[in-house]
Structure formats: structure tokens, C-alpha cells
Amino acid sequence: MLRLSPVYSEIKQLRSKGDCSTAVARLREKPPTNDSDAFEAVVCLFVCGDAESPLHVCRTHAWKTKWSVDIVGALSESLRGGDADRALALARKAVSTEAAPYDAAAIYLMLLQRNGLIEEAADYIQRRLQDVPAGETFLLTIMAEIALSIGNWGDAYRGACAVHCVDPNDFRALIVMSPVAYNIGNFYESLGHA
């Protein structure tokens, strides 16, 4: 579990609920001063659709913890369109430690997903991510997408529903729910999510 300052705990809650404008505004009022808050800033900006600002935080913050150095290196490499193998190697190192937070796992899974390594992603989820808290919407969304891509309708639906409990407007979770509902024979619900 990441130890965030009170302000950055609020920022994480806001972005997890889909209130990106307020989350980013709060972030800009109080720049991060430690690795945990800086990593939340990176994730918040990234999840909220800003590609340049997370790179700025990755470059300018003086990262101290090993997991954070590795995971921001992986994300930076990916966002810059750099070496995908290097990004994956850094992400693997980051999530191999117990100190790495859930959002580091989300970035790792996202990189696996982008590189077509779905079986590795599914294996990691099975081994390490069985009891993810509902507020971890970034991770749960990626997990639901991976479950959908391997035809695991139950886990895809469970993950997408968990996201919707926190953020009912999360479009990526809606996208997962539509084909899942279709594949389990609930055509009307599928159309409702489309």
C-alpha cells in the first residue's frame, strides 16, 4: 500500500472516481515532495489523459525508491515510444518487490497488454492480484480488459463492475461490459453498455 499525504490521498480518490479536473487542479496546487506523492501525480496525469505532464514529473522528481525508479522508467520509455523490451524489463523489476503499489502493477499489466503478452499478464493477475480493493480503478480496468481478451467473462465482468461502483462513467469499463454481456447471452445489457 502506498503511503500518500492527505492531499494526494484525496487526489487519488478524485481520479479514481473519474473527477479528473478536480484531481489535476488539486495536484497543481501542491506539487509532490516524496516518491509516493510523485508517483500518484504521474498516474493521475496519465489516467486523466495528459501524456506530457507525467513525463515531466518522471524527469524532474528526484526518485529514491527502487520500485519507483524502475516503474517511472518503464512508463517514460513507453510514453516516449522507446524500447518496449526495456520498458517491460523495468516494469518487471518494479513489480517484483512487495513495496510496489497497485498502480505500478497496473502500468506493468498495461505494458504486457500493449505488447501482446496476455498470458503473462493473466498469470501475474492469478498469482499476485486476487484481492484488489475497489478504489484501485486503474488496475481493475486493466485487469478487466485482460480477462475479456482471454474470454474470462466472470473476471472481466467482476472487474468492470467494481470500477463502476466507484466511477459509473468509466468508459473503458463500459467497453468491457458490453462484449461480456453479449457473450453470456444478455444481449439487452450488452446494447445498454455499447
Image: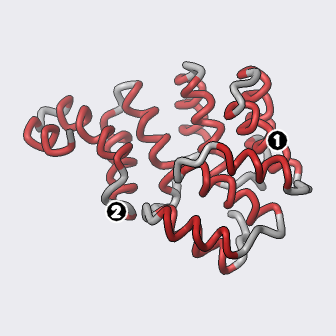
Amino acid at dot 1: Asp
The residue wearing badge 1 is 70
Q: Which quarter of the figure has residue 147?
A: top left
Query: Which residue is at a point 75% across and 24% down the rendered structure image?
Result: 82
**Looking at this view, is 50 or 132 the one in front?**
50
Q: Determine whether 88 is above or below 99 in the image.
A: above
Query: Which residue is at a point 74% across and 52% down the rendered structure image?
Result: 100
Q: Position of residue 52 (x, y in %)?
A: 67, 44
At label 2, counting other C-alpha atoms closer than 10 Å, the crowd grade (few under 14, some 14-19, many 20 or more) is: some
Contact between labelled residues 1 and 2, with CB atoms less than 8 Å apart: no
Query: Which residue is at a point 34% across and 26% down the rendered structure image?
Result: 151
Q: Determine whether 113 is above or below 144 in the image.
A: above
At label 1, counting other C-alpha atoms closer than 10 Å, the crowd grade (few under 14, some 14-19, many 20 or more) is: many
Q: Quarter holding the N terminus? A: bottom right
Q: Position of residue 139 (x, y in %)?
A: 53, 48
N-terminal-most mark, 2 or 1: 1
Q: Determine whether 150 is above or below 95 in the image.
A: above
Q: Disc 1 on helix, strand or loop?
A: helix
Q: Is residue 114 left or right of residue 56?
A: left
The residue wearing badge 2 is 165
Amino acid at dot 2: Cys
Q: Position of residue 144 (x, y in %)?
A: 42, 40
Q: Quarter holding the C terminus? A: top left
Q: Position of residue 95 (x, y in %)?
A: 73, 43
Q: Is residue 152 left or right of residue 55?
A: left
Q: State the CA–CA distance, disc 2 to disc 1.
A: 31 Å
Q: Which quarter of the figure has residue 29?
A: bottom right
Query: Which residue is at a point 66% across and 78% down the rendered structure image?
Result: 7
